[in-house]
Amino acid sequence: MKSLPEITDKVKKNLIWKSIFRRDYRNTVRDRAQAVFGNVFLHLHPVQVRESAVKLRFTWGMGGITFFAFIILVITGVVLMFYYHPSIEQAYTDIKDLEYQVPYGVILRNLHRWGAHFMVIVVMIHMFRVFMTGSYKAPRQFNWGVGVILLVLTFLLSFTGYLTPWDQLGFWAITVGTNMGAATPFLGYQGPFSEFLHITPFNDVRFALLGGALVGGNALLRSYIWHCVAIPLVATILMMVHFWRVRKDGGISKPQK
Amino acid sequence: MNPFIEIITQPDNIAIVIMIFMVSFFMVWAFQQAFHNDRLLAAGLPVDGENDKFVDTFKPLVRIELIIALVVMVGLTVWSILVDAPLEEIANPTLTPNPAKAPWYFLGLQELLVYFDPWLAGVVLPSLIVVGLIAIPYIDINPKGNGYYTFAERKWSIIIFSFGFFVLWLLLIVIGVFFRGPGWLWYWPWQEWDHARVVFEPFRDLSSVVGVDSRSMAGFIIGAVVTGAYLIGGMVAPYMYWKKNHPEFLTKLGMIRYITIVFLFINMMSIPIKMVLRLVFLIKYVWITPWFSI
Ligand code: HEM
């Protein structure tokens, strides 16, 4: 029998191990820094941070938790996509199958649903904390704006997901929601001044959102693509910008008096 | 079962109960830290975090991130084991549920539909909210309170933001979720929902208060004058006040910022004003035109 240190030593000298981790980790200043900027995921962070970033008191970790909720949603969402067809013939039965046929399908769906609620809650609290610490002030004005767009995208992500099970809840929530589109001034057929632009139920904003005059198969396909592809893509890009700017603006804000 | 318990324990509404607890907790924590820092500031001492030292990211920060991730993951898993996401009947365009509610985070906007026509409640006001939020850093010229909790140094911005955040947004959501039943009528937690209930609302328009038909020419003019007076008065009055009392503030603010702030503010205040008009004075419209009504 070999002792543990001997085994670790052997593993760490192994060609494959070395190809992955590149160098050994000793607990030195240099290696602690290397652990951060030598790792594609960790290098979002600076090598050193102010104490406030480590204590929960200041940020409550809310931005990070929002991001983590997003990751959970991407992972569970991708798995859900394996079981789902965006058509009015199949969508509803696919969700029923999750309940009765797919192993752990219920938990999978629950995680995605409650994760979505959770993300909406924490992103609002994140915004509240950024406001209360005055962290939108110079030089972080632009990043606050990026954040507001991310907030809107979070709502839209959740909203477009509502229709996908094709049940009464989603159907009528989307009906109520898109009816607002019909009330857009100039561009919705029920909105003020739309008669000047010859807007009808068949060429207004609502029609563009639904791909038709009623919530039907086209609306389901549209909301599915917004939900699974288009909005996550834009949100991901904006999160990259958001994190990049947190760094470029000098990290988590510190008291400036 | 008690109707309120029934509503609160509906799977999707559990999220709102969680939100109420989380938001209250963080609200208290934020203001507690703000008042704490205010005391330090008053005593001329450095605020929390001012003399922060640096620590390594690896491992202190990475460790706490991992712990938070695990806690969140465990919490969501437990939630998902205990509560199942509902699936209602298959979509049926011929069967309208009553009430048909939007997702909870949009219920504040749906609640606005009680007080405003859809083009305002569903399109114009939401757009202004987004624009207004983005504008905040550019219109708030107070350099103090940057990077720490404080209340004393930025009272007004915090009061106005909190009013929008807690009252106009979160409170309206809570009302929409828990207090609105069939026909979007108000239901107290102890009241049964009654689908046959009709409320005769003796609503009138502003000009009918003085006995003028709101759809007549005279009513149109009265409405236009009142609306115009609100807009113009709202734009001009703060100017007069600041010019007299704090002219240096006005100079610092500049014209563009002034117009943006005041415009956003009077739009925001139009919400509570219309609520009072409607709930207290039973007035539905202030101004009816052939194209739109306010
Ligand atoms: C999908 C949504 C969002 C994600 C994933 C996200 C993520 C983050 C993260 C990880 C941080 C680092 C500090 C922290 O954890 O508090 C941060 C900071 C920041 N966020 Fe967000 N955020 C989001 C939405 C928002 C929103 C809605 C706002 C404001 C309207 C906002 C404004 C800011 C600002 C100004 C900072 C810098 C704060 C500072 O330096 O103290 N973000 N965000």
Image (spheres, rainbow, N blue to C red):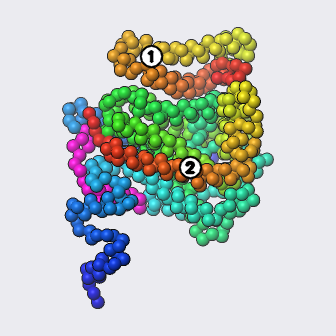
Magenta region includes residue A194: no
Q: Identify the image quadrant of residue B40.
A: top left
Crowd rating for badge 1 (residues with CA inside 10 Å; few <14, some 14–19, many 20+): some
Report the front residue among B202 and B2.
Answer: B202
Q: Quadrant of ligand 1?
A: top left
Magenta stretch: give its range: B47-70
Q: Is residue B100 left or right of residue B8?
A: right
Disc 1 residue type (three-letter)? Pro
Residue located 50% across and 62% down the image: B77
- Report the disc number at residue A231: 2
Which residue extends farthest bottom? A1
Magenta region includes residue B66: yes
Crowd rating for badge 2 (residues with CA inside 10 Å; few <14, some 14–19, many 20+): some
Chain letter for mark 2: A
Chain letter for mark 1: B
Q: Percent position (x, y) of residue A51?
A: 26, 50
- SS of the residue under disc 1: helix
